[in-house]
Image (cartoon, rainbow, N blue to C red):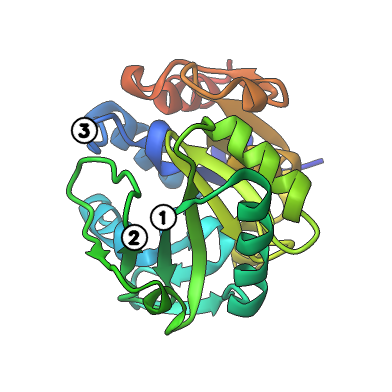
Amino acid sequence: MTSRPYGFPYKLVATDLDGTLLRSDESISARTRDALAAVTAAGAAHIVVTGRAVPWTRHILDDLGYDGLAVCGQGAQVYHAGEDRLLTSVTLDRQLAGLALSKLEAEVGPLALAASRDGLDGEVLVGPGYRVQEGPLPYVAYDDPTEVWAAPLTKVYIQHPDLDDDALALAARETVGGLVDVVMAGPGVVEILPLGLSKATGLSLAARRLGLKAADTIAFGDMPNDIPMFAWAAHGVAMANAHDDLKAVAHEVTASNEADGIAVTLEALLAGA
């Protein structure tokens, strides 16, 4: 039986960022901050587990005063925030990714691409026709396709002019699922990843460094890329705004990210409910 640190039933709280910990304006509410502070004061660890690579995550961690481990890039990067260094980094085989994209385009037609480069300061490259979500996250536009493959990558983003996210992700998995992994991580965000990589693989590595296990873990998320993390953790909590595929495998559904869903659940657990 898992011991309860000072009444809180989990030793590890794993939270996704977009659509989960973050509100639509990329802020974190005071209530949610207080709830996370309370569970860490009770002896649990908090680990951010996000599809964002480190450069798109660091400013959020800084705002939280976060100095522990974070899992970034869909599990590719285990990042030590306090030391500003990568503990692990998994890169995409660029030759294999190029082959996968060629096969996929032969099946569904031309794709618009973006790519996330590896490293603490890896740039996100955005190609012609790729629809970038408005916001503060930096990116570099490119015209020459060879630029994508010029340096190590953590992932490639794909978009299709006609297929929606679910249809594109399904087509990609059916066509090239034996070469790469494919996840839908948010609106307009379908990603090509190294085969076998997931948030669960990254979280398990981070947890092991803390001496913690899946049985110690409660996880929060909102998108299909969180499904492996829910399968790994003892308890998976989907936000009210979550994708139906994640809700289908969640142990419970909490309030939305706009309504402090993480805090709602953590407060109840702290109260022994």
Give the SS element for disc 2.
loop
Q: Quadrant of residue 267?
A: top left
At 49% from the left and 16% from the top, the residue drawn is: 240
Q: Residue 182: where, in percent of width, then height?
A: 64, 50
Do the CB atoms of the residues marked 2 and 1 lie less than 8 Å apart? no
Q: Quadrant of residue 32?
A: top left
Q: Which residue is mark 3?
A: 25
At 54% from the left and 76% from the top, the residue drawn is: 89
Badge nearest the viewer, 2 or 3: 2
Badge nearest the viewer, 2 or 1: 2
Q: Alpha-carbon distance for marks 2 and 1? A: 18 Å
Q: Alpha-carbon distance for marks 3 and 1? A: 16 Å
Q: Is residue 114 left or right of residue 135?
A: right
Q: Earlier in the sequence, mark 3 or mark 1?
A: 3
Q: Quadrant of residue 108?
A: top right
Q: Is residue 238 visible in the rendered structure shown here?
A: yes
> Which residue is at the front of the view, 169 or 29?
169
> Which residue is at the front of the view, 198 or 262?
198
Q: Residue 11: where, in percent of width, then height?
A: 60, 47
Q: Earlier in the sequence, mark 2 or mark 3?
A: 3
User: Crowding at label 3, few (<14), some or many (≥20) Cα neighbours within 10 Å?
Assistant: few
Q: Residue 202: where, in percent of width, then height?
A: 61, 62
Q: Which residue is mark 2?
A: 127
Furthest residue toward left: 136
Q: Which residue is mark 1?
A: 52
Q: Is residue 207 visible in the rendered structure shown here?
A: no
Three-letter amino acid code at the position of disc 1: Arg
115 up-or-down from 32: above or below: below
Which quadrant would the N terminus be assigned to in this image? top right
